[in-house]
Amino acid sequence: MGGNDLVLTDQLVEDRRINGEVQLSFDVAFEHFACEQALHGYGLSAEEVTAGVIGGGDDGGLDGVYVFLGNRLLHEDSDVFQSSFSVNSLENGAPLTLWLVQAKTSKSFSEVALDKVASSCNLLLNLDANDKDLSNLFSQELIARISLFRKTLLRIAKRMPAVKIRFSYVTRGDTEAIHPKVRVKAQHLETQFAKILGTASGEVEFLGPAELWKRASVIPSYTLELPYQESITHGTSHIALITLGDYLSFLSEDDGSIKSHIFDWNVRDYQGNVEVNREIAASLQDPDAPEFWWLNNGITIVCSGASSIGKRLSLSDVQIVNGLQTSYTLHNTLRDKYEDDPEAPVFARLVQVRILVTGNQAARDAVIRATNRQTTVPVASLRATDDIQRQIESYFYDRGWFYDRRKNYYRNQGKPLDRIISIPFLAQTVMAMALGRPDYARARPSSLLKSDSDYERVFSSATPLPVYLWLAKAQRHVDAFLQSSATPASGSEFTNLHFYLAMLAATDIVGQPFNRPAHLENAAREDVFPGQARLVELWGQLRDEFRRYQKRHGVGPDQAAKNNEFVQHLLESFGWPRSHRK
């Protein structure tokens, strides 16, 4: 029945292709779909998947590149690359994963494809290689993505990271019909990956229509059962004592990995080998330690419904909003032991779990804020619960757009991907168009809102809600133009310049440079934006000025795009001198 899997998978890709705002070719749509399914377990947003797709030529046989430190996807502005980052905060043996994807619409798996990847990785993963030499062979976009891995490895080397290089080879061919020579080549590639570093490991997987359809068909379950030992009930909410074994099963997927989607609403990521997590791990490993729940603040779950049969709770719309550090440390410390010996005494120990039942989103937000005030959490981490965030979400929703202040919330509901807007994306569009700083938006894809001052500038109650929606729609329009025009922007051009083109278009409407969202109220009210012909003109001049600036200053494209001097150069080239900014 393998043919049915191919028909259904092709239809799924085609539906996404024709229903999206950007009319991609089938090949490009398949690349995006392949990357999404290869990294299915990480719960990446559509924007995160797209950011890792390598477009254009000189891709070295790679169509997607992603780097993870622990379970966190790395961006060029991630904490690990900042001078303030303490490498000692990482645990020894912290997982560092480079995930490579090749996606081909052919109906077979070939030796040639594996040979090309092996040859490319031999050069790209050589720590002695420099970007200038590599640029003679590979695209800037590919080099930049691989550099995230190389820089991270060098940065955290003293913590002896557990390096894994994974390669997903995706085609429309039947994995049961793979030629033995291709499988041998895959084994050789795994060995090559393992030789990158003495402690590294390599893994190659083949994904065909059957595997793609199976992954795409899996909808994360938010209705889960939780056995308990003792429980106190008030109304419909509960405080329960759960054995560590049962809680570990509750957290784990069938393959042993953690259910990351039930932490989507938690206010911060796993912090790794920090002191509190070391203490949690130590108490789990000490057979003479006091009861675990005596030493631990426990777990807080919010859900929309809870029913009890016997000593089992059935929970709907589960989200763990406090206790991520405990949960991840428990999972990382005891996962392997549980697989080997689920009856070990440690799994009979108890953890306290609070189960709060409410369908009211404002009440859930209040719980998230309250339960995280007891620990040191950066203010920016609580932003999703702010009134302005909920107002934006409600305004978008009423107009057929979906503001994903909870990562993947609307995606998991099956809403159109082109109409889902994340907090980081909206923040970048506000910074680029409304505040006139496309350089700042480009330089901080994941850290733009870490400072209170930046947050307050971007998300101000003084900015009318229609302006936020107009900005999101305008940036999507620009992105669609760049990806679907007769001569689409290269991956590097898109990354570096799409916020610049959006700024120029907004400035063109207003008629002069500006740095206050109020200037866009008329555009938002009338829902106007430059047409195709004008965008072509703006794009052509932008590209010319970008090349001219790089040549004059002797800098590369990334450095130029992140420099505010280029913003001033650009505005003046359009006849908008700095003194006219309002």
Image: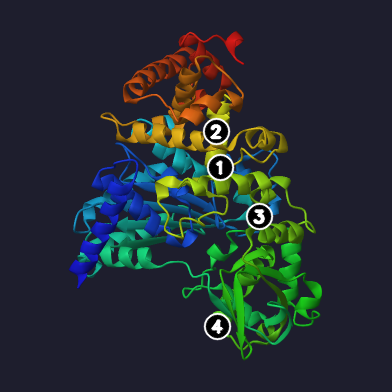
Q: Earlier in the sequence, mark 2 or mark 4?
A: 4
- Residue denoted by label 3: 268
- Residue denoted by label 2: 467
Give the image location of residue 74, x and y in percent.
54, 47
Q: Residue at x 62, y 82 (%)?
A: 245
Q: Earlier in the sequence, mark 2 or mark 3?
A: 3
Name the quadrant of the C terminus.
top right
- Residue denoted by label 4: 340
Q: Earlier in the sequence, mark 4 or mark 1?
A: 4
Disc 4, SS: helix
**Mark 2 and mark 4: span between their CA atoms?**
56 Å
Which of the two discs, 2 and 4, sits closer to the camera?
2
Q: Earlier in the sequence, mark 1 or mark 2?
A: 1
* Apparent side of residue 47 relative to residue 233 in the rendered image (left or right): left
* Apparent side of residue 67 relative to residue 156 in the rendered image (left or right): left
User: Residues at badges 2 and 3 in contact (C-beta under 8 Å)?
Assistant: no
Q: Amino acid at mark 4?
A: Asp
Residue 406: quarter of image: bottom right
**Mark 4 and mark 1: span between their CA atoms?**
42 Å
**Mark 3 and mark 4: span between their CA atoms?**
31 Å
Q: Amino acid at mark 1?
A: Pro
Give the image location of residue 340, x and y in percent.
55, 83
Give the image location of residue 208, x and y in percent.
27, 63
User: Residues at badges 2 and 4 in contact (C-beta under 8 Å)?
Assistant: no
According to the image, what is the colour scheme of the structure?
A: rainbow
- Residue denoted by label 1: 424
Label 1 crowd (10 A; few <14 / some 14-19 / many >=20): some
Which of the two discs, 3 and 1, sits closer to the camera?
1
Give the image location of residue 478, x and y in percent.
40, 31
